[in-house]
Amino acid sequence: MLIRARRAVWLVFAALVAAILGALAAAGVWLAPHLAAGDLTVAVSGGLGLLGMILIGALALTWVWLDRVLVRPLAAASRGARIIARGRTAHRIEVPDGHLLGDLPDALHGLGEVLHEARSNVERAVADGAARSEQQKAQLEAVLRELSEGVVVCERHGHILLYNPAAQAILGSDPGPGLGRSLYALIRREPIEHALAALTEQQAAAPQADAAMSFVVPGVAGEGLLRCRMRVLSVGPEGHPGFVLALADDTRQVRALHQRDALLRQLVDGLRGPLASLRAAAEALGECGPDEGPQRGAFEAVVEEESRVLSERLERVAQDARGLLGGGGLRAEVAAGVLAAAVARRLDARHPAVRFGLHGSGLWIDGDAHGLALLVEHLAARIAAARGVERIEMETLLGDRRVYLDLSWEGEPVAGAQLDAWLAEGIPAAGPGVTARDIIAEHSGEAWSQRHRHAGRALVRIPLPASSRQWDLAPSAALPARPEFYDFSLAAQWQAARGDSGLVNRELRALEYVVFDTETTGLRPSQGDRMISIAGVRVVNGRLLRGDHFSALINPGRPIPALSTRFHGITDAQVSDAPMAPEVVARFKTFVGEAVLVAHNAAFDMKFLRLQERAAGVVFTNPVLDTLLLSVLLHDHASDHTLDGIARRLAIEVHDRHTALGDALVTAAVFLAQLPLLEERAIANTLGEALAASEQVLDVRRMQAQF
């Protein structure tokens, strides 16, 4: 605005100067023949030249004066009107003294007040109309907060759209789940994608069926186990597919199961020794002659009877132990068709020469679907390679309260030693050190090879726990519709963004940001000053998520100067037990992920981070936006571009200044207020445009510093 106005005024005055010079030149040409004396001609010409210089000088001064009292105030009024139009009605238009705008600034303020009143009336009407909806939303959120089971809703690529406090407690909080983050940073990707693909296929085959799947994944940092139950759903107004995941921490249960298993094994092993001794004694007594007394016969009978009782008891305990060892309550129902489809997908990707299919309709199995898919894939690949066959069929049969899972092929059975060797092999996708035999043991089963009931065929049979559902594939009643809340529109944005060539082409509002700030021992990072605090808040889909933040004190490893403490209030005692900078910076990088970084005077804060990258083992390759440079870009007429000055200009309330978290929150509010101004003035709609515009401002400031 300012540049265009100046250019227009300059062109007008340039035209006037050209006209004056032309008129004086024409006058000189006209007067020359009429002036006889040469000196008079020179005098008149000199007078005309002097008059021209005076007129040009007067025009120049007039131009400078108009620029100060009219052009600049008009540009300031225009920018102020835009800020007021964006809802910042408390903004005071910054116009220089002595302007010629009259009461225009006051009129604009009055217009802002009227606009504010109109907006307030509309907001009150909308609030009144939506009161009941908001109350229901609050009640639903309260229910989610009280649930002891974690709930996470994601779009199909794993970005989190909703989570409750229980999920945060289960998945951890350093960093834990957050809107816009990837679930796969917290849970292993493969079991989730396997379950999602299986449920999608099941739902496509029977749209009205109750499509859900339970499975178990390793806990956070590989410790313990998480029991998960997944359902497929649609999220967002466009109906983009996603899923809801219910989580429970079974670490304690697994530990108890292991202890129970150890006790049962001790019991079984402890009975074998006494039983062997008792039987040996009975045999010794039986070898003695009959002349050792009539009581010997009775004693032998007692020994034999006790041996028989102990044998039966041992057999019962061993049988019960086989039923108790392993997964127990961690199993879930899975259809054989879903399991076979998962195995076929894995074989197509890793062993394309092997053709795999399900014979018959299939039964329901009570087990770990992901683990069983890995087991069946492993055995099918080994059978195909050892027997030279291309086609392997899976069949499920019901018998003895268990489901027999058979893998059959044309040819001879597998030798027991060969099958044992396959079962002893590890399956890396199931977890470190997990073998095929471990997966079978988790399902209280065993495996063997035998001839098939059809001549010329053989099979490997694995007895597995049977589900009570079996063939019950009838559609269940449709679940009641659930209200959409939180930020499900993110799913549509991520879906559209997957076609972009990179972040630089993404719209600013569609990006994920982490707005951060640091507190330091001083202002010279290259001369030994260090961070003592860092904080960041997340901005997703144009929303400031105050609850999704990072804040940590840092031990600088050196005394904090008294002058710095007077500024931010952090003392040596407060940071004495805090972690060192590399540890905190590594955690902060995990919190940031791939988000765009935003800071005020970002070069200062980024310098402190860069100095810690090598020690922390991280590299900040994230794009960086600077609210200071954006302010210069938007309000080049203003001289105050401090954080406080920008906040005043945009009518933003400031709290907890000179704390890392407080300053990060203020910077985030400033950044969100700048976004619509950038869009309105067509300065920057995408990240690439914002970065390029900021670089241009930086180049201008570098050039100004040379003068």
Image (tube, rainbow, N blue to C red):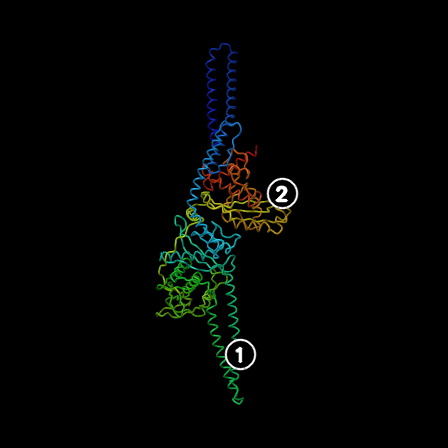
User: Label 2 belongs to which residue?
Assistant: 566
Dot 2: element: helix
Label 2 with label 1: CB-CB less than 8 Å: no
- Amino acid of disc 1: Ser
**Measured from the top left, where is residue 198 in percent x and y?**
40, 58
Q: Label 1 crowding class (10 Å Cα cut-off): few <14, some 14-19, many 20+?
A: few
Which quadrant of the figure has residue 408?
Answer: bottom left
Q: Residue furthest top?
A: 36
Q: Label 2 crowding class (10 Å Cα cut-off): few <14, some 14-19, many 20+?
A: few
- Looking at the picture, tell me which residue is in the foreground, 369 or 675: 675
Q: Is residue 324 above or below residue 531?
A: below
**Measured from the top left, where is residue 671 in percent x and y?**
50, 41
Residue 277 got which mark?
1
**Quick one: quadrant of the C terminus?**
top right
Q: Is residue 286 above or below residue 251?
A: below
Q: CA distance from mark 2 to mark 1?
A: 82 Å
**Measured from the top left, where is residue 191 in percent x and y?**
45, 58
- Amino acid of disc 2: Arg
Residue 487 got which mark?
none
- Residue at x 52%, y 15% (from the top left corner): 47
Disc nearer the start of the sequence (2/1):
1
Dot 1: element: helix
